């Protein structure tokens, strides 16, 4: 069959001109879909006949080259193509001879528009995604739902994620924050909307800006949550590990924030939370103005000068009173009698007889022998035994106040706090991995069999004293928050916790503390970065990480979700990015899980804060107390 140009008045064929196929819009999406729709509208404005519809159905509609300019072509070595978006503008008829004369229209009648059901089930939605999903988007089928997200997003969470379940109910997430079903997203009819229309509608929804306080104050409100939005530097061509975040923004949102809006720039929950927050700030400002001339209970950096002056005057009066008390006690001590020398001889005799009869432990014997030897030397010539130093270090760590009181009593001769500090400062350490630790791990792995190199990582935080001191050995101030050079943190703040990472052998008794970091409030993505750094160093040293154990706070639970990429089918393991084919099991510490269950059960008592239920049946603390009182 000979092909002809579809423009009226031109009968060019493939023998005397180049013909180009008109794209049918039912086969395309995105830019090609819009181009095909413009071409169809232009051709139908010049032709209205049954032959045109047949050519569209057979996808055999052609336009010759005489209707396009030279800039509308893409010329190759052997083939010439039309550019996407090229519209015929040359040699077009002023009025088509095929247009049928218009008849007088009948009066309009009201007709109900019947919407076409594009998706009747999740399988129809999957077929549409395979056929019409834009190139910049990807989809995943999971347990009873489909996930759509942008393929160009790199990071822990994509910018926008669309989730549709079996009931064709739609949910959307913005940087990991999912909207509620009753919001603007939930009103979108998935059954009557095309897949491209769903993506375009969700992308065009305005996003809630969150809460904006008047001042940069610390937000301590259970109804307000920090929402982190991260962007990554992807300039490197090959990414073997998740890249560290280059910049990240933190937005304050209400716990029930709707995220996606129909109009405006803030949702109602965020507006209400912002109003309550500003009312709290106003009340706090008024309270500080009322306390302007009152004395301080404790000094702070934000103390008012007038309150500081009032406090100094009160402290001066207290100092004068204390000086009078000290002078009176010194006078009373001069009148007191000393300890009887005979009692000292009796005590020495008792300890000596006990040592000769070997009725005490070896450490007890060493301790009293050292005390007898030290009492015979001068203060400048005292040398303490290493075991005695270890014992005193343990006592000082338990309670520094009790240790000082024991020294001041004069019953025992113990090292001073300065001596103990010098012993603790012999080995200088800093947050992060030390070269000596890495070298020791490499030497240890060479002497192990392959099955002995399986390790279990554990991570936990311990409370430390909040203090900033100067270290002579390191020649710097220590005590600040420190998560390493490659991780963003609130540097300049005093650390309140120490994050310890420990490694233990899975089939051996090998144990080794790897590193520590000074923290105050650590986020999940920072914990993930520390975890992968430890795994990479251990794999480089010859070990293989088989499992990872941590307790169950919210940051650790979110970190586990990030490690396994929100895999709901296998939430207890993740892929080892440093050792292809191997997996790392993610385990919550069983004692902490038991403690959490116990606390939740106890909180469900009468007058408690929680109500536990399973399968519609309430679980209360009195059920356990009642069963324990029953005899079996």
Image (spheres, rainbow, N blue to C red):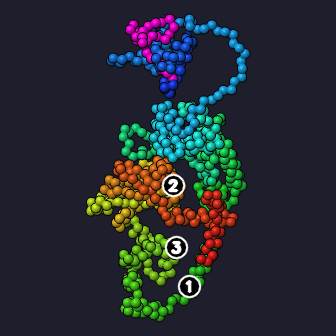
SS at badge 1: helix
- The answer to which of marks 2 and 3 sits earlier in the sequence is 3
Closer to viewer: mark 1 or mark 3: 3
CA neighbours of label 3 inside 10 A, class few (<14), some (14 to 19), many (20+)? few
Dot 1 and dot 2 residues touching (CB under 8 Å): no
Q: Quadrant of residue 446?
A: bottom left
Label 2, on which residue? 557
Query: In this image, 578 relative to 171: left or right?
Result: left
Q: Nearer the viewer, residue 95 or 587?
A: 95
As for residue 188 lying within the magenta part, the answer is no
Q: Is residue 461 visible?
A: no
Residue occupying image coordinates x 71% and y 22%: 110
Numbered range of the magenta stretch:
1-25
Label 1, on which residue? 334
The Cα atoms of the two marked residues, 1 and 3, are separated by 27 Å
Residue 317, x across and y down, in percent: 65, 68
Q: Nearer the viewer, residue 539 or 233?
A: 539
CA neighbours of label 1 inside 10 A, class few (<14), some (14 to 19), many (20+)? few
Residue occupying image coordinates x 69% and y 10%: 104
The Cα atoms of the two marked residues, 1 and 2, are separated by 64 Å
Q: Is residue 264 visible?
A: yes
Classified by dominant secondary structure, the portion drawn in magenta counts as loop
Residue 185, x across and y down, in percent: 61, 39
Residue occupying image coordinates x 35% and y 50%: 581
As for residue 6 lying within the magenta part, the answer is yes
Closer to viewer: mark 2 or mark 3: 2
Identify the disc placed on residue 401: 3
């Amino acid at each position: 069959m000979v092909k002809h140009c579809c423009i009226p008045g031109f009968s060019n064929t493939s023998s005397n001109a180049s013909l180009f196929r008109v794209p049918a819009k039912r086969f395309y999406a995105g830019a090609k879909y819009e181009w095909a729709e413009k071409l169809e509208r232009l051709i139908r404005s010049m032709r209205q006949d049954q032959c045109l519809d047949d050519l569209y159905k057979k996808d055999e509609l052609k336009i010759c080259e005489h209707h396009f300019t030279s800039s509308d072509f893409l010329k190759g070595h052997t083939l010439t193509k039309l550019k996407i978006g090229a519209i015929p503008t040359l040699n077009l008829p002023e009025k088509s001879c095929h247009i049928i004369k218009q008849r007088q229209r009948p009066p309009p009648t009201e007709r109900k528009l019947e919407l076409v059901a594009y998706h009747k089930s999740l399988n129809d939605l999957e077929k549409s995604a395979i056929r019409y999903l834009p190139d910049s988007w990807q989809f995943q089928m999971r347990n009873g739902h489909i996930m759509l997200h942008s393929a160009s997003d790199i990071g822990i969470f994509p910018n926008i994620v669309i989730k549709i379940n079996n009931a064709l109910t739609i949910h959307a997430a913005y940087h990991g924050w999912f909207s509620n079903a009753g919001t603007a997203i939930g009103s979108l009819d998935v059954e009557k909307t095309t897949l491209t229309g769903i993506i375009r509608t969700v992308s065009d929804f305005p996003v809630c800006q969150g809460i904006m306080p008047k001042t940069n104050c610390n937000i301590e409100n259970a109804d307000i949550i920090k929402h982190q939005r991260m962007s990554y530097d992807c300039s490197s061509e090959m990414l073997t590990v998740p890249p560290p975040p280059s910049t990240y923004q933190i937005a304050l949102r209400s716990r029930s924030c709707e995220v996606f809006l129909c109009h405006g720039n803030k949702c109602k929950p965020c507006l209400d939370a912002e109003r309550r927050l500003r009312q709290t700030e106003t009340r706090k400002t008024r309270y500080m103005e009322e306390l302007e001339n009152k004395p301080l209970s404790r000094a702070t950096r934000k103390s008012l000068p007038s309150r500081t002056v009032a406090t100094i005057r009160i402290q001066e009066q207290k100092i004068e009173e204390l000086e009078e008390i000290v002078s009176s006690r010194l006078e009373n001590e001069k009148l007191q009698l000393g300890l009887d020398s005979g009692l000292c001889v009796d005590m020495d005799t008792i300890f000596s007889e006990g040592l000769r009869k070997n009725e005490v432990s070896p450490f007890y014997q060493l301790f009293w022998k050292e005390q007898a030897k030290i009492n015979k030397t001068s203060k400048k010539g005292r040398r303490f035994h290493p075991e005695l130093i270890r014992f005193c270090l343990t006592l000082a760590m338990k309670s520094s106040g009790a240790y000082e009181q024991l020294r001041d009593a004069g019953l025992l001769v113990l090292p001073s706090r300065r001596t103990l500090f010098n012993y603790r400062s012999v080995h200088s350490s800093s947050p992060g991995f030390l070269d000596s630790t890495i070298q020791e791990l490499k030497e240890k792995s060479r002497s192990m069999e392959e099955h002995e190199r399986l390790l279990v990582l554990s991570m936990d935080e311990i409370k430390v004293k909040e203090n900033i001191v100067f270290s002579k050995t390191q020649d710097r101030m220590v005590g600040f928050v420190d998560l390493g050079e490659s991780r963003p943190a609130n540097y300049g703040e005093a650390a309140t916790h120490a994050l310890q990472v420990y490694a233990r052998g899975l089939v051996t008794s090998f144990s080794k503390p790897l590193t520590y970091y000074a923290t105050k409030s650590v986020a999940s993505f920072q914990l993930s970065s520390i975890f992968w750094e430890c795994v990479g160093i251990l794999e480089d040293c010859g070990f293989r990480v088989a499992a990872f154990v941590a307790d169950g706070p919210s940051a650790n639970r979110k970190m586990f979700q990030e490690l396994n990429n929100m895999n709901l089918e296998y939430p207890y393991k993740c892929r080892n990015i440093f050792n292809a084919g191997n997996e790392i099991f993610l385990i919550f510490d069983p004692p902490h899980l038991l403690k959490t269950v116990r606390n939740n059960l106890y909180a469900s008592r009468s007058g408690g804060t929680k109500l536990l239920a399973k399968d519609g049946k309430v679980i209360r603390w009195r059920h356990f107390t009642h069963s324990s009182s029953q005899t079996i």
